[in-house]
Image (cartoon, helix red, strand yellow):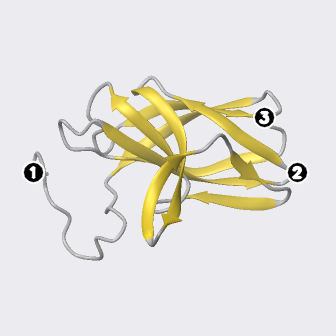
Amino acid sequence: MAADVAVKTPYARATAPGQPNSAVFMQINNQGEATRLVNASSSAAKVVELHAHTQDQGVMRMRQIDAIELPANSQVELAPGGLHIMLIGLEAPLQDGSQIDMTLEFDDGTSEQLDVPVQMVMPAGMGHGQPMSHGKMH
């Protein structure tokens, strides 16, 4: 694990059956020198990419980025509508209440293994209201 980097509250977005992609969010606290998150991997998906949302002529677009900057003594938020880790080609639907594995790799060669809980997340811009139910009743 990177000496001064701590990952807080990681979670993956639950998916409906047949939905091929998901995203992972978290807070990364860096108490030391500036570093960068340069790669992530998980057995839950065929491809894992670092992504950012950018404004392109007034439209929000997702794009893959090479790294997520972690400035010295900072907290970086990976959240819906912003920086996130994309899971592409899921091996199975991500069910609320389950968890997936993830490895984060930093530019100093260190890595951190995470167990990431899967949670229902309202899509950005959906506002408040009742989430749609796609499955078993509790």
Mark 2, residue position: 32
Q: Which mark is residue 137?
A: 1
- The quadrant the N terminus occupies is top right
Give the foreground label among 1 and 2: 2
Image quadrant in which you'd find residue 75: bottom right
Q: Position of residue 116 (x, y in %)?
A: 48, 40
**Alpha-carbon neighbours of circle 2 within 10 Å: few (<14), some, or many (≥20)?**
some
Give the foreground label among 3 and 2: 3
- CA gap, disc 3 to disc 2? 14 Å
- Drawn side of residue 138 relative to residue 45, left or right: left
Please state which amino acid type lies under the numbered disc 2: Gly
Q: Is residue 67 above or below residue 82?
A: above
Q: Earlier in the sequence, mark 3 or mark 1?
A: 3
Q: Earlier in the sequence, mark 1 or mark 2?
A: 2
Q: Earlier in the sequence, mark 3 or mark 2?
A: 2
34 and 63: which one is in front?
63
Q: Position of residue 117 (x, y in %)?
A: 43, 43
Q: Disc 3 on helix, strand or loop? A: loop
Q: Which mark is residue 107?
A: 3
**Alpha-carbon neighbours of circle 1 within 10 Å: few (<14), some, or many (≥20)?**
few
